[in-house]
Amino acid sequence: MKKQTGLFSCVFLFVMVISQSLSAQTLKDFFNATETPATWLGVDFTQVKVLNELTGTPSGIKEQFNKINQLILNEPRKYAVDRSFNKPDIAKDIRFTIAKNEAIDPEKISEFSSDDVRFKKETIESIVKGYDFEDKKGLGVMFIAETLNKATVAGAFYVTIIDMGTKKVLLTERMTGKPAGIGFRNYWAKTIHDILLQIERGKYSEWKAANG
């Protein structure tokens, strides 16, 4: 009886390990097959600092964050997330970042500083761990905003690929883009457009060579 119980335990453990390994998502999965499911999760602004901005109220600035997220969805040909990440059928689900951004304290958004580099890898991991992706599984792509600096005319974001099931950060890299346009939304959305072009024109291939 004890032998049967021990055998059953071993078989159960083996099945569990195999199941977890099959369900786990890797960067190799992401880069080696265009049909590997992935989801665009939007832009997280929860710990962003808007630096050296002389116009706009804190609450008014906060309102623009999710307008930027919506703009990316509304103009898919310009903000070509699918093309940049070589995922023709990438899903779009920004409700998680939308909810997080809505909870931002507007009084903590702006400051006058030259400190552009504020995050570490642990910062990104902590932000991702704070999400509840409900029952969503698979790979997620998210931009995590670090700074929007009016003085240096640059926006800094961490391009982040995660396993939504485990909330493990598989890849994160700091990239910067140049703003342009009229109005806060269009001006800073241009930085995201710039970064997406950088990914499409070389960074994606660089990541694939390192991780594919």
Image: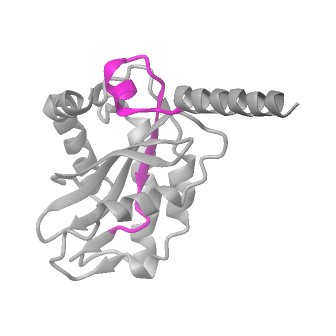
Q: Position of residue 143 (x, y in %)?
A: 35, 49
What is the span of residues highlighted in magenta in the rendered image? Answer: 24-48
Q: Residue at x 59, y 32 (%)?
A: 17
Residue at coordinates 45% horizontally, 76% vertically from top-left?
106
Picture residue at 50% right of the left edge, 53% below the top: 97
Residue 201, horizontal then vertical, whole percent: 14, 30
In the displayed orientation, state which residue is furthest to the right. 1
103 magenta-colored: no
Q: State left or right for residue 190 relative to residue 59.
A: left
**47 falls in the magenta region:** yes
Taking the image as shown, residue 107 lies to the left or right of residue 14, namely: left
* Residue nearest the observer in this picture, 66 or 147: 147
* Looking at the image, residue 105 lies above or below residue 10: below
> Which quadrant of the figure has residue 202?
top left
74 vs 32, nearest the viewer: 32
Quadrant hosting residue 171: top left
Q: Is residue 171 left or right of residue 139?
A: left
Residue 152: percent from left, percent from top:
11, 67
Question: Could you say which is closer to the camera, residue 81 or residue 52?
Answer: 81
Q: Is residue 60 above or below residue 128?
A: below
